[in-house]
């Protein structure tokens, strides 16, 4: 597929997907969603890929939905924004959450609205010190979407989540890390190198175990302890029969570094 609105590349087991509408602060349009979904489908089917890095070109990560997109145009009647959410954002978030590899979001500049939620849908969020996160929906009379009302309370608690959503205050990257919204904040000049190092590390780790860890963590809030113990047992049974577990044990016994294949 030829990409116009994203950059997509795979090297050494690391897939790199960059939003590429820098003149529009990488805001989403329908055509960009189609390209992102195609790239995610490639990652899902290519067993040589071990990790995804999601980043963006230019001075911003993503300003959210492009209100100039024809599907959002205010004509004789108001647009069906719910249809846009169901058509594009719901499958995007579910694809990221169900991806067969761990995911890293490298956030530079502003991550606003849906852009913030897409970053939070990744397993690990690394932000440049100058980056910030903004739930801008209340400014135009809307509710946080793209999973925002799910991610925020789980990461920062209900009081902070409601405050961020209702007041639409910009949250600096350092405070986002302090509050537990993201994994790490680094100096702007160190963002690329930090993400590259982390991606290389994840690409050598037992991929299935990492993804099952994500699934178990996300299931916990709606499970009883008994249900969670059962899920853990099922995952342990599956992973205990995997080649990566056998390699991990062998490497431990032989006092050497393991060579995981992601299988």
Image (tube, grey):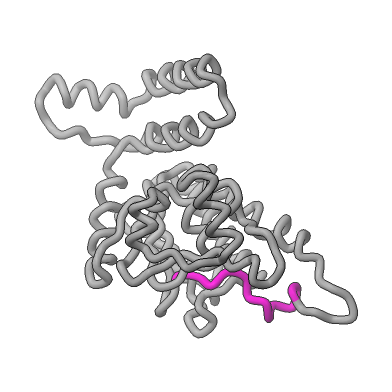
Q: Where is residue 32 in the image (x, y as percent from the top left)?
A: 59, 70
Q: Is residue 253 left or right of residue 107?
A: left
Question: In the picture shown, does residue 201 fall above or below 253?
Answer: below
Q: Position of residue 61 (x, y in %)?
A: 45, 70
Q: Is residue 33 visible?
A: yes
Q: Position of residue 62 (x, y in %)?
A: 50, 70
Query: Is 64 or 215 nearer to us in this picture?
Result: 64
Report the quarter where the N terminus lies.
Answer: bottom right
Q: Is residue 56 left or right of residue 166?
A: left
Question: In the picture shown, does residue 3 fall above or below 181?
Answer: below
Instruction: Report the residue at 43% width, 16% height from top.
Output: 237
Query: Is 239 or 84 nearer to us in this picture?
Result: 84
Q: Is residue 210 left or right of residue 115?
A: left
Among all residues in the image, which is located at the extreme bottom? 23
Instruction: Report the residue at 56% width, 24% height from top.
Output: 223
Query: Is 200 or 55 nearer to us in this picture?
Result: 55
Q: Is residue 8 visible?
A: no
The range drawn in magenta is: 61-72
Q: How many labels were placed on the picture?
A: 0
Report the quarter where the C terminus lies.
Answer: top left
Question: In the picture shown, does residue 64 fall above or below 49?
Answer: below
Q: Is the stretch drawn in magenta largely helix, strand or loop? A: loop
Instruction: Report the residue at 33% width, 72% height from top.
Output: 130
Among all residues in the image, which is located at the extreme right? 76
Q: Position of residue 191 (x, y in %)?
A: 28, 65
Question: In the picture shown, does residue 104 fall above or below 114?
Answer: above
Location of residue 189 by image quarter: bottom left
């Amino acid at each position: 597929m030829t990409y116009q609105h994203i950059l997509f590349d795979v090297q050494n087991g690391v897939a790199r997907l960059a939003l590429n509408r820098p003149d529009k602060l990488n805001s989403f349009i329908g055509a960009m969603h189609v390209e992102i979904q195609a790239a995610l489908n490639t990652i899902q089917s290519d067993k040589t890929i071990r990790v995804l890095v999601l980043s963006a070109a230019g001075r911003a990560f993503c300003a959210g939905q492009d209100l100039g997109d024809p599907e959002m145009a205010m004509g004789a009647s108001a647009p069906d924004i719910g249809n846009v959410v169901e058509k594009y954002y719901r499958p995007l978030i579910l694809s990221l959450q169900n991806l067969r590899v761990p995911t890293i979001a490298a956030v530079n500049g502003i991550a606003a609205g849906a852009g913030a939620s897409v970053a939070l849908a990744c397993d690990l969020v690394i932000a440049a010190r100058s980056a910030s996160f903004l739930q801008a929906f209340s400014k135009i009379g809307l509710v946080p979407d793209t999973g925002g009302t799910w991610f925020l309370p789980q990461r920062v608690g209900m009081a902070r989540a409601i405050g961020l959503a209702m007041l639409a205050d910009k949250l600096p990257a350092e405070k986002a890390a302090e509050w537990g919204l993201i994994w790490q904040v680094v100096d702007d000049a160190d963002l690329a190198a930090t993400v590259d190092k982390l991606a290389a590390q994840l690409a050598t780790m037992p991929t299935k175990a990492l993804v099952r860890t994500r699934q178990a963590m996300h299931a916990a809030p709606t499970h009883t302890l008994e249900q969670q113990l059962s899920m853990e047992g099922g995952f342990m049974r599956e992973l205990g029969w995997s080649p990566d577990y056998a390699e991990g044990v062998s490497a431990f016994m032989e006092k050497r570094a393991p060579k995981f294949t992601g299988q």
